[in-house]
Image: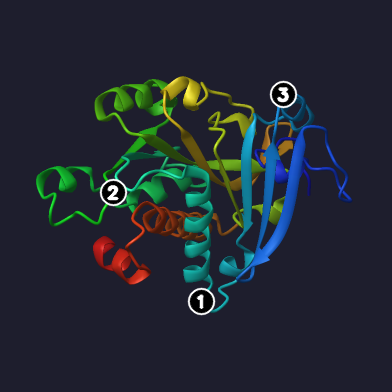
Amino acid sequence: MLGNRTDLAAEDLPRGGGELAGVQSEAYDRDGFHVTRVRVLDEQGAESLCKPIGTYLTVDVDSFVRRRENAFAAGAELLAEQLRSLTALPEDASVLVAGLGNPAITPDAVGPETAALTLATRHLKAQLPEEFAAFRPVSVCRTGVLGTTGIESSELLRSVCAAVRPDAVIVVDALASRSTERLCRTVQLTDSGIVPGSGVGNDRAELSRRVLGVPVIAVGVPTVVDAGDGLIVTPRDIDRYVKDAGRLIAYGLNLALHPGLTLADVDMFIG
């Protein structure tokens, strides 16, 4: 089943391996996962792919969804590696992680589920600097949605950034795909930021370096297909899929932001 809208850069590449002006792409396999890297180089590429200039990494996590042995550990490590390749931040740089979306609507809850398992360490670094010397200062927030807060995510995050002054922001959100086969089985990471709700035609103010004043990395998982005529398609087991996706992304974030941690360490701190 195909929809018209997509947040995934990989889905806008020409079928059959053709090329687009101003766009570079490559694909490879790593530890049982398929990775696609798309680079939008200039305005011509942005127009061709209908995506802002930047790098888009798409990781197929189907083996994790199918519960392949050790797939969670391998997937979290791979996401951490891909995230580090986009950020290249100094070890002491501070990061704000923002979970976008509505926790009361399951297909929109990837951001809140991720935020709940992301280690917040900024206050610990400030109060106990020696004991937490190996950790990066990380702040975590959940923005909610305009319909329940009356505040745009961009407005809220601008205020938080003014108060916390992070060196970078990572936003996590649910996305839309063009194909049901990708639902909850793909993670996209990009350094181009995000426009919340754009995948289902509910565009809100963008979250980008231009808006927030610092680099913005967007991480997302497609949970819906826009089938048209007001119909949205989502998997039958969406509750489990969203919880699993939030956990996988959170562990990847924790490993990427605190390079000295292992999966066992993250398990211990999260409890």
Residue 156, given in percent of the width and then of the height, sits at 35, 24
Is the C-beta separation of discs 1 and 2 under 8 Å? no
Where is mark 1, residue-wise? 70
Q: Which residue is located at x 52 percent, y 24 percent?
A: 206
Residue 270 appears in which quarter of the rendering?
bottom left
At label 2, which amino acid type do we have? Arg
User: Which residue is denoted by mark 2 in the rendering?
Assistant: 136
Residue displayed at 26% across by 53% down: 135
Disc 3 secondary structure class: helix
In-front residue for pair 72/246? 72
Asked if one can make out residue 109 in the rendered structure from this viewpoint, the answer is no
For label 3, the residue is 43
Q: Which residue type does callout 1 highlight?
A: Asn
SS under mark 2: loop
Residue 130 relative to residue 269: left or right: left
Q: Earlier in the sequence, mark 1 or mark 2?
A: 1
Relative to residue 42, is residue 1 depicted above or below?
below
Marker disc for residue 225: none
Q: Quadrant of residue 171?
A: top left
**Is residue 96 visible in the rendered structure shown here?**
yes
Q: Would residue 46 be found to the left or right of residue 158 on screen?
A: right
- Is 49 placed above or below 68 here? above
Residue 144: x and y, percent? 39, 33
